[in-house]
Image (tube, rainbow, N blue to C red):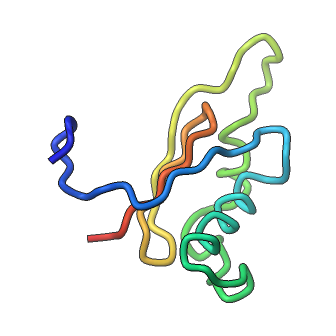
Amino acid sequence: MNQHGDERETVFRSTIDPTGRSLSLQVVAAVATFYDVDKTDLDPIYTAIEADALDRLLTTSDPGRSPNGSISFAYEELDVTVTSDGALRLRECE
């Protein structure tokens, strides 16, 4: 058990590039890498989460402030967590 009481282990970690392509596309790419499949073999991410809302996670309307927060959702039998600091974590769903 880890320090947060969660028995599941992280199976994949990555970093999101906030200046790169959309966050939702980066999540799809990470899941495809995890499963070693082409991105087109996966279900569309919008079946799991509103892609536009996910893309806005790393943006802010106030240029003086950095975004703050995280989001978790299930996609392709994985629990996906993305934080506003660019961390991406994939875990197998229970």
Relative horizontal placement of residue 71, taking residue 44 as reference (left or right): left
Q: x, y (%) of residue 48?
A: 54, 70
Q: Position of residue 57 (x, y in %)?
A: 66, 41
Please count the marks in the image.
0
Q: For the point 46% across and 52% down, which residue is it?
A: 72
Residue 3 percent location from the top left of the image? 20, 35
Q: Residue furthest bottom?
A: 41
Q: Position of residue 36 (x, y in %)?
A: 61, 80
Q: Is residue 20 above or below residue 27?
A: above
Residue pictured at 72% horizontal, 83% vertical = 38
Out of 50 and 4, give the one closest to the viewer.
4
Q: Quadrant of residue 50?
A: bottom right
Quarter of the image with the C terminus in it: bottom left
- Looking at the image, which is closer to me, 1 or 44? 1
Whether 14 is drawn above or below 58: the answer is below
Which residue is depicted at the point 48% across and 52% down? 89
Check the image and name the residue furthest to the top.
64
Toward the viewer: 10 or 61?
A: 10
Q: Residue at x 50, y 77 (%)?
A: 76
Indicate the quadrant where residue 27 lies: bottom right
Does residue 71 appear left or right of residue 36 in this picture?
A: left
